Image (cartoon, grey):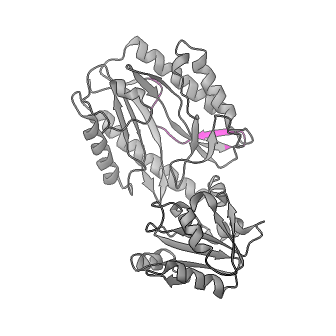
Amino acid sequence: MDYAARRGRLLEGKDVGGFLIFDLDRTMPSQMDRPNMQYLSGYDGEGALLITADETVILTDSRYLEQAKQQVPELPLIHAELKYYDELAQAVRGRGLKRIGYAAWRTTDYVLGRLSEIPGTEWIPFEDPVTDLRAVKDADELAALREAIRLAEEALAHLRDTVEVGMNEVDIAAALTAKLHELGSERVAFGPTVASGPNSALPHYRPTLNPRALRRGDLLLIDFGAIVDGYASDITRTFVVGQATEKQNEIYALVLESMRTGIDAMHAGVPGDVPHEAAKRVILESPYAEYVFLSPLGHGVGLEVHELPKMGLNRGEILESGMVVTVEPGIYIPGYGGVRIEDTVLVAESGCEVLTSFPNETLIEVGA
């Protein structure tokens, strides 16, 4: 990955002498700016990244010094043990920096207050320009995403073939997580959703909310992802435990049509709300209109599970070739259950490539 080129693009068109990426769990929420630091340097520990047109330096403490030396041996390293702000101030003054940009969305008032104590320095807020850069993926990023999808699908296939009536949602989530680790995933992309029966009507249900054992006839919704080189996959499939009913098949077919309609409406140059509205219309014109999904149709995925672009709810972000997004419509009926199908697609000039390959043509019966 060409990190230097990424840093160069970050500084383009900005009237600043440098840009700061700062991520220190001691003084801010965990991993608040970590994805941007990894994107711009390849380093994924705590610390700071001070970027100028002439050089980029990393500041970190003894917990991460060796990691930084291994991951980014080409970058100068400043040991900032318990005096991060003093060391950072010295680095800023030593380079004569007067105007420094930062991502306002990823910086707390406390951190900004400490930075503002550096005399003669003006801190220039930008919403989050690194995240904007991350929206379009390069070849290396796509390779990592494809592998993360492959691992997730292999784990899901194992679950499909081993799930049984009576298994607990929490235990299924734990088994899925263990399988991901066994296959080589760095970690789970997020806490898996394993929702059975009426619990599947809760779009972001967590197994610990109201854990139940699988029963014959349950809809079973699985939403999870793997991590490869820091890049996340995100896939949802809905199964049925035992034989599917006519109503379950009908709902599933509608959601599948909705997803495919949304995908068909996607290509470079289209605002994200266009595929959202196309997919939503399929369900609004069905007998299940009152149970249509209310969240955006999908989202970008990469170093974070949810990143740019957003699709839907009046979000007008224009899709560009190279963006990787999820498409995940659903029908959620309280007290009965829900169906969601989620694929990941790569936007191209004249359409898109579906990266997810796990079967979704019909409602798959498991645990029979």
The reply, left or right, for residue 177 in relation to residue 93 is left
> Residue 344: where, in percent of width, then height?
54, 41
Give the quarter of the figure containing the N terminus: bottom right
Q: Is residue 251 visible?
A: yes
> Residue 216: where, in percent of width, then height?
27, 21
Of 351 and 245, the residue lying toward us: 245
Q: Which residue is drawn at 54% across and 52% down?
A: 302
> Residue 366: where, in percent of width, then height?
31, 27
Residue 49 in which image quadrant? bottom right
Residue 244 higher or lower than 227, as above or below: above
Indicate whether residue 181 is drawn in magenta: no
Direction bottom: furthest residue: 94
Residue 311 in which image quadrant? top right
Of 279 and 19, the residue lying toward us: 19
Of 330 and 84, the residue lying toward us: 84
Residue 82 in which image quadrant? bottom left
The reply, left or right, for residue 128 in relation to residue 80 is right
Indicate whether residue 350 is drawn in magenta: yes
The magenta segment is 348-362
Q: Residue at x 72, y 76 (%)?
A: 17
Residue 267 higher or lower than 74, as above or below: above
Give the quarter of the figure containing the C terminus: top left
> Residue 333: where, in percent of width, then height?
44, 20
